[in-house]
Amino acid sequence: MPQALERADGGWAWVVLLASMMTQGLTLGFPTCIGIFFTELQHEFQASNSETSWFPSILTAMLHAGGPLCSILVGRFGCRVTVMLGGILACLGMVASSFCRTLSQLYLAAGFITGLGMCFSFQSTITVLGFYFIRRQAMANALASVGVSLGITLWPLLARYLLEDLGWRGTFLVFGGVFLHCCVCGAILRPVATSVPPETREGPPPPSKTPVPSCLAACGRAVQRHLAFDILWHNAGYRVFTLGVAWMILGFPLPHVFLVPYAMRHGVDEHKAALLISIIGFSNIFLRPMAGLVAGRQDFASHRKYLFSLAVLLNGLTNLVCVASADFRVLVGYCLVYSVSMSGVGALFFQVLMDVVPMDRFSRALGLCTILESISILISPPLAGFLLDTTNNNFSYVFYMSSFFLISAALFMGGSFCALQKKEKQGRQAEAEAATVEAAPQRALTVEGTDGSEKQPSTEIMYVTSV
């Protein structure tokens, strides 16, 4: 950047933190309200559950899959421009979706374009916090995550209110204007002075006589720079975590999409059904920062992997409550317990990834992990919708499906981490025993001489140990 207007850990950093909190609430909190429109969209387009489920799956998948492209834009144009570009794309996608006449158009407008725009906005604000906060970075990230909880709380209430008065088309049009606030938040992100020299940007490559190989090589270097396939191959802990999370995501987002239509199908009032998602978000306002602060303590450093697996296991077991009863009071209790496990998963995710991957490779490892997450997110809701279509709208199978993926992922990660830790411990013991064996002959190299006054080296023992 040509000039540095602000300094790290200064007064403007708290304004940036507020902007990051608001942006995360607008973007990460938005997918939780899609379930409110599920029945309306299904009736509007005369679509099956599986076809309607592609809309939230594409939206959420793009919210995660655009990470590598976002990092390229941040490196080229900076966080401020990328956040504002994301706000414009999210706005255009929602405005265009209000005029859609087919589900395919809705997939492109509200799914692809809006999802990509939200990805640019929220990931850029997370990046900029690392520049503005040096000494209080953990606290800043914990406070910024409160914005997600606020978004989960407020988006369903706003969606339910607007849907009654304006219909889903008018609501999506208003949502386009709401997303323009990301541009306001992006304008707040002034350039910040850094203690490290700015990265030198590589200019365009010189013309080559063989452009095809050079283009392929450039693509290979870009993939290697932004995606950690080498870490996935050589780091067993990262491999366990990434595969476990990708399997877990097949069941994790399903309650956010299907809880509201499930409650409404069993006679719960529309307002009360929308309130269930808000209860989850309101509880996360207090639980998520607490879980983040607890996860950041050094006392739990060696146990974070197992705590993460335990949170995933609790999340899977909690979903079985919906199978037992659809009474509103039972569902409120389900939402409260679900919030506890959801907060643990959200707070421990980045901490565990930092534990299994060196920090100099963290951004690449996170990029590959989000790509695999997006694939799982893209598959999960349509798969659940297909299950609903084949079982005559029996939502119990959806929650069974969610529990299966979460519980099996938790058992896989917990067991694998335990086996890796045991193997690592055995390796350290073997190294210690080998060092002891090597040191013992060295102590025996000197034996007492014939006169008993001094020690002479024994050439025979030295010859044996040198083999």
Image (cartoon, rainbow, N blue to C red):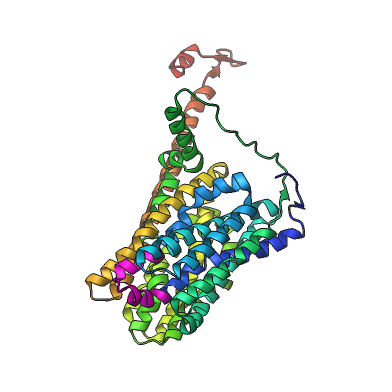
Whether the magenta-drawn stretch holds residue 44 is answered as: yes
Residue 359 lies, with reference to residue 323, above or below; the image says above
Q: Main secondary structure of the magenta part?
A: helix
**Closer to the camera, 66 or 340?**
66
- Quadrant occupied by the N terminus: top right
Q: x, y (%) of residue 350? A: 53, 55
Q: Position of residue 313 (x, y in %)?
A: 40, 64
Q: Residue at x 45, y 57 (%)?
A: 62
In the rendered image, residue 332, in percent from the top left (x then y), is placed at 45, 82
* Residue 233 position within the rendered picture, expressed as x and y whole percent measured from the top left: 41, 39
Q: Identify which residue is drawn at 71% across, 62% down.
A: 14
Residue at 53% across / 62% down in the picture? 347
**Could you tell me which quadrant the C terminus lies in?**
top left
Confirm whether residue 288 shows in the render.
Answer: no
Q: Quarter-wise, where is residue 374 in the image?
A: bottom left
Nearer to us in this view, 170 or 16: 170
Q: Nearer the viewer, residue 428 or 352?
A: 352
Q: How many marks?
A: 0
- Identify the residue at horizontal 55%, vertical 76% (top origin): 154
Tell me which segment is drawn in magenta. 37-56
Residue 316 in sight from this viewpoint:
yes
Q: Is residue 324 magenta?
A: no
104 to 194, vertically: above or below: below
Residue 3 versus residue 17 in the image, above or below: above
